[in-house]
Amino acid sequence: GGEGGVLRVGTLTVDMGNVLGTGSQGTVVFSGELGGRKVAVKRILSHHIQVARGEVDLLIKADAHPAVVRYYATEKDGDFVYLALELCQGSLAERIDPSNRCSRDNSATSVKKNDPPPPPPAWGGAGVPGAAQAAGAGAGAGGVGAE
């Protein structure tokens, strides 16, 4: 794999040719797939591991909230940490504007999340959790951007 191709990192497939957004410190969000599920893949430089840890911890704590994207897995290669996140239709800017709606209905009664949230990550020797996956989460598109 490489820029413009498909990259396999552990259980994650990253479409390097489909950039969904970019952020600070070299962060890039790509389209990807995890276990047959389309996901947003946030690629963070490995030397920003503390940022990735903090983000994963916050996403797990806020997992039941209908306005927060779901965290599915973390994978790592030599240079990058990859976070598999719920795929969103639209951007954060579109989400803030009430005239543009994400395809996931945000009313608490309409969002069905029957599965329990994934367990907190067990930060291993490299400082990256294993590929903890939320099995069969019934959520649709959420709100992933490249913040």
Image (spheres, rainbow, N blue to C red):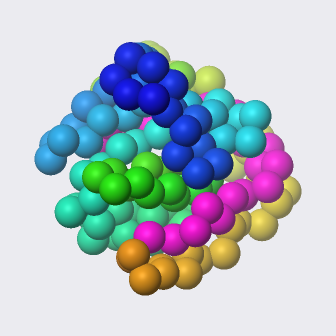
At horizontal 25% and vertical 42% (from top left) the residue drawn is 27
Residue in the image at 72% along x and 58% along y: 134
State whether the magenta stretch is mostly helix, strand or loop: loop
Relative vertical location of residue 30 with respect to residue 78 in this rendering, above or below: above
Is residue 3 or residue 143 the one in the foreground? 3
x and y percentages locating residue 78 in the rendered image: 34, 56
- For the C terminus, the quadrant is top left
Q: Nearer the viewer, residue 114 or 24?
A: 24
How many marks do you count on the picture? 0
Q: Position of residue 121 (x, y in %)?
A: 55, 75
Q: Is residue 59 left or right of residue 116?
A: left
Quadrant where the N terminus is found in the figure: top left
Q: Quadrant of residue 38?
A: top right
Residue at image position (79%, 44%) is 138
Q: Which residues are magenta?
A: 128-147
Query: Residue 35's x, y, as percent?
Result: 74, 42
Task: Please state which of residues 117 and 40 is positioned toward the viewer in this rendering.
Answer: 40
